[in-house]
Amino acid sequence: DAGVTQSPTHLIKTRGQHVTLRCSPISGHKSVSWYQQVLGQGPQFIFQYYEKEERGRGNFPDRFSARQFPNYSSELNVNALLLGDSALYLCASSLSDRGTYSNQPQHFGDGTRLSIL
Amino acid sequence: ELKVEQNPLFLSMQEGKNYTIYCNYSTTSDRLYWYRQDPGKSLESLFVLLSNGAVKQEGRLMASLDTKARLSTLHITAAVHDLSATYFCAVELYGQNFVFGPGTRLSVLP
């Protein structure tokens, strides 16, 4: 079975531009989360979506937005890119339902490495 | 705001030795996850701990959770080079939000 797939794998942008990152979850997984991982640090939670609804948002500015499609794939958009947005962006999917806790491990994709010049 | 700390942040150990990585968190939770990340790779789920006193073992790794102490441990037995990686703990909060620790970078030397 295919795991979580993300595209593109690498991306180079300049300050002020915008970017769209894409994620396809494991088949049957309805929950998708996005994380930002700066080099040498742990992943920081950005968004979680379930059944096309935003269920959680981390402490990120409004320049960051996301959405989930009927096929459960997801996009992360970042506007007005800053140098500090350079990071590995990870997408994770899980079998969690609408419950308050997932009780499930998240399955991570290989990430998109975004570099801002 | 929940804080998740790991100790140590860097660990260099010889093959065959035992060691423990500690994960402390600052708020009540009884759901804790351990992940492994190899350089340049994504995160791989190792353990899911869902109650106080939970203990899980896989090969040379054993994880436990003490919710009263807000502490989880990842114990390594007779380390081998293949265990070299960065290990993250993550606490799950209400609403399926996960907070990750900073990671422990483990190097197992021959």
Image (cartoon, coloured by chain):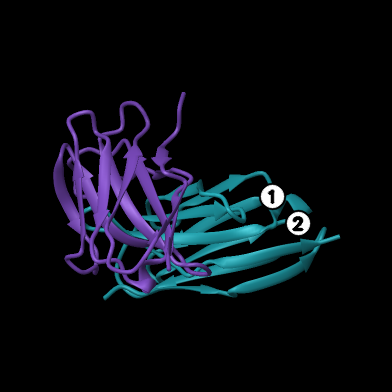
Task: Indicate the amino acid at tag 1.
Answer: Arg
Question: Which chain letter goes with mark 2?
Answer: B
Q: Position of residue A70 (x, y in %)?
A: 17, 30
Residue at 69 percent across and 49 percent down: it is: B60
Mark 2 touches mark 1? (CB < 8 Å):
yes
> In this rendering, would A11 be left or right of B92?
right
- Give whichever of discs 2 and 1 has the lower sequence position: 1
| Whole-number angstrom distance, CA of label 2 to CA of label 1 | 7 Å
Q: Nearer the viewer, residue A59 or B44?
A: A59
Label 2 SS: loop
> Quarter-wise, where is residue A107 in the image?
top left
User: Can you identify the residue that label 2 sits on?
Assistant: B79
Q: Position of residue B24 (x, y in %)?
A: 45, 72
Task: Indicate the amino acid at tag 2.
Answer: Ala
Note the chain letter of the purple one: A
Vertical placement of B54 versus B20: above or below? above
Residue at 77 percent across and 54 percent down: it is: B81
Vertical placement of A91 versus B90: above or below? above
Dot 2, crowdedness within 10 Å: few (<14), some or many (≥20)?
A: many
Question: Which chain letter goes with mark 1?
Answer: B
Q: Position of residue A114 (x, y in %)?
A: 42, 58
Q: Position of residue B104 (x, y in %)?
A: 58, 67
Residue sticking out furthest to the right: B110
Vertical placement of B28 versus B57: above or below? below
Q: Nearer the viewer, residue B30 or A96?
A: A96
Quadrant (top left/top right/bottom left/bottom right) for the C terminus of chain A? bottom left
Instruction: Chain B: give its colour.
Output: cyan
Label 1 SS: loop
> Quarter-wise, where is residue B40 in the image?
bottom right
> In this rendering, would B42 be left or right of B39?
left
User: Can you identify the residue that label 1 sits on?
Assistant: B60
- Whether residue B81 appears in this view of the structure is yes
